[in-house]
Amino acid sequence: MMWLGLELALILFVVAAAVLVAFSRDIVGAIVTFAAFTLGIAVIWVLLAAPDVALIEAAVGAGVTSVLFLITVMKTTGMSGESEETGARTAETDGGSTADGAFRSINVPALMMVGALAIPLGYVILSLEPVGAENAPAVVETYADGELTPYGHYIENTLEEAGFPNAVVSVLVVYRGLDTLGELIVAFAAAVSILVVLEREDIL
């Protein structure tokens, strides 16, 4: 019961942080809230028995990404996040003032898009086996009818099909090699973007 309460509290915290990030006008405050959001996600990954994913989430999401956001803000608009002229112009457009314009107005099309994605995603999550279930496909080699699960397939056939004794290496390099290549391209693009932000001050 205690764990259920902790999980519900974490979910509420993550949802509230995500909403604040989306609607906050203060860019620096949104970045700090985003860091808290990613830390909450990291704790959830720990509860789901995925400490490796939690470590990456905390290091990349709450650490590296948040720092890069802050550096970008300091090199463009300054630590205030928005200049006074920009804030005043935005407030006038929304029909408010800078004093009561702490949050952005709701973007209805974006909200509908999020709902359209969240409903099927929630259905899939609720239909999954409970965490730690003994008959989950990720921890058993065969289904009830004797057919191999993905786990069983990799355990049985990795060495013969891929030539690697390590199933993890085989999955990353052979079975999902194109996906790994895409991740490398994204990482390269991110590295180039960092160099642009940190060293090419003349283009900002």
Image: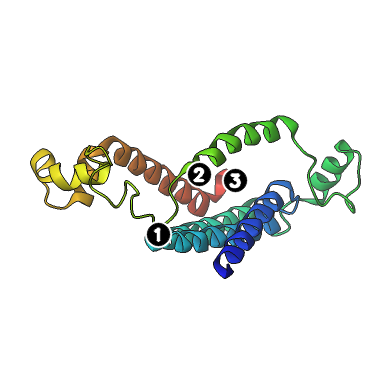
Q: Mark 1 or mark 2: which comes first in sequence? A: 1
At a point 45% along the width and 45% down the height, the residue shown is: 128
Q: CA distance from mark 1 to mark 2?
A: 16 Å
Relative depth, front residue between 193 and 59: 59
Amino acid found under the numbered disc labelled 3: Leu
- Give residue 146's quadrant in the image: top left
Left/right placement of residue 32 relative to residue 58 reads right
Instruction: Name the residue at the top extreme.
Output: 109
Mark 3 secondary-structure assignment: loop
- Badge 2 crowding class, 10 Å Cα cut-off, few under 14, some 14 to 19, many 20 or more, is few
At a point 8% along the width and 41% down the height, the residue shown is: 160
Residue on which disc 1 sits: 50
For residue 125, the mark is: 2
Residue on which disc 3 sits: 204
Mark 1 secondary-structure assignment: loop
At a point 28% along the width and 41% down the height, the residue shown is: 144
Res. 76 in view: yes
- Badge 3 crowding class, 10 Å Cα cut-off, few under 14, some 14 to 19, many 20 or more, is few
Q: CA distance from mark 3 to mark 2?
A: 43 Å
